[in-house]
Every structure is written in structure tokens, then in C-alpha cells.
Amino acid sequence: MVSSSSLAISPRKLRSDLYSYSYQDGSSTPLVIYVLSSLIERTLARNERISSRSYGGFGKTRVFDCMEVPDMTIQSYLERIFRYTKAGPSVYVVAYVYIDRFCQNNQGFRISLTNVHRLLITTIMVASKYVEDMNYRNSYFAKVGGLEREDLNTLELEFLFLMGFKLHVNVSVFESYCCHLEREVSIGGGYQIEKALRCAEEIKSRKIVQEPKHHHQFSRVLL
């Protein structure tokens, strides 16, 4: 049984995780993943209420739409990306910055169940290239995200043009988005995040089949 104290999440604990997280074999999933998934889920719910018809956008932004809604939750998808790429917490914060900029630059675009997974894998890959010193090839990110390499290449290129190639994130902007994620914990989604953490830890504690030793060997998922 996992103690409740070990699962408690607070703005201070999130900040510590964001700034001092160091990956080692067997490291737990960064807290930012649970916070970001909670925030995106709330955004999806709000967008569904705004529009009775679920749509992502128009014109070139429709490249992010899937034919069908992927059978994977936002949290599970982000956990999968972390499991196979080991991208640090700062990558997810920068990806969050990119998603916000993308929505601001493309009026009429709404995050939806049909486009959120493709938008996430694209922004995380681009953010990883911006933040990390060493990165996987696009073909590897494509396998992790459930896409063909050519499709992810197209998504990346369209994303860069739709963003106007404005990818720089300075310290003050990074800090402001970290503060926003902290507010999500303290005000918006603290209960949901702790619930997600508890479920993830309980599933992990009951897991019998071990992860493959080489993380390049992973199950396929299709978008």
C-alpha cells in the first residue's frame, strides 16, 4: 500500500521537481506530467462545452487532426513519452509554452480529443530539441508517439511555420509558466492530480511484468 504522504503534491514540491529533477534508472514520473495532463484535460472539457461540435481548427492546423480519437488518455500518453524518451521536466514546461503560443497564433484553433495527441508529441519533440543537449531522431519520436516518420516530419514543419519559428523561451517566460502550473496544483486541479498520482502508483505497485531492459523495445500505438 502506498502511503498518502508520499503522494501528496504541493506547489513547493512541484517547483522542486521542476528545478532539481535528475533522471536515474527507476526514477518516478516527473510531477509536471500529472499537472500538465490535468490542465489539458480541463482545457478539453472547457472546449467541449464551448462547442457542441468537436473540432480542432481550420486550414493548415487540421494536419494535427486524427481520423479517430486515440484510445489513450492524456496522462498515459505523456507517461509513455517520458518512459521511452526520458525527457526532463523542463521539456514539458517548454512544450506547454509552445502549445499556448500555438493557440494564440492560430485564432480559431481549439485543442480537442482528435488533435491533442499529435500536438503533444510534436511540441515535446521540438521542445526537447530546444532544451536537451542530446536527442533522439524524429523516427524514434514517431514510434513513441504512434506515427509514421513522414507524418511527424510534416507535423514538425507545419508547426514551425504556424509558430513563425518563434521558439525561444527566456527565463522569465519559463518561470511564469512554472508559476501557472503551480497555481493549477493549488487552485485548479490539485485533487484530480493527487488522484492521478495515486492511481499511477497503485498500478505500478501491482505490476508483475517487468519493463524490457532496452527501452527501444516498446509496444506500438497508432494515432
Image (cartoon, grey):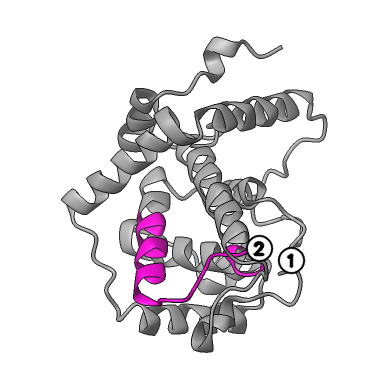
Q: Does residue 106 sit above or below 128 in this rendering? A: below
Left or right placement of residue 11 versus residue 8 in this view: left
Q: Residues within 10 Å of mark 1 (few under 14, many from 20)?
A: some
Residue at the spot x=35%, y=77% of the render? 163
What is the quadrant of residue 193 in the picture?
top right
Name the residue at 38% across, 40% down: 181
Q: Is residue 26 in view?
A: no
**Mark 1, residue position:** 69
How many circles with numbers are drawn on the protein?
2
Based on the picture, tell me whether residue 110 belongs to the magenta stretch: yes
139 or 181: which is nearer to us? 181
Q: Are marks 1 and 2 in contact (CB under 8 Å)?
A: yes
Q: Position of residue 209 (x, y in %)?
A: 82, 35
Pick out the residue farthest to the right.
Answer: 208
Quadrant of the image occupied by residue 196: top right
Q: Which residue is mark 2?
A: 113
Give x and y (percent) for residue 177: 31, 47
Marked residue nearer the N-terminal end (1 or 2): 1
Q: Quadrant of the N terminus?
A: top right
Residue range highlighted in magenta? 94-116
Image quarter of the C terminus: bottom right
Q: Residue at x 66, y 78 (%)?
A: 148
Identified by mark 1, the residue type is Val
Q: Is residue 22 above or below residue 222?
A: above
Q: Secondary structure at mark 1?
A: loop
Name the spot of residue 3 as percent of width and height, x first: 62, 10
- Residue 58 visible in rendering: yes
Q: Secondary structure at mark 2?
A: loop
Q: Classify 217 as above or below 196.
A: below
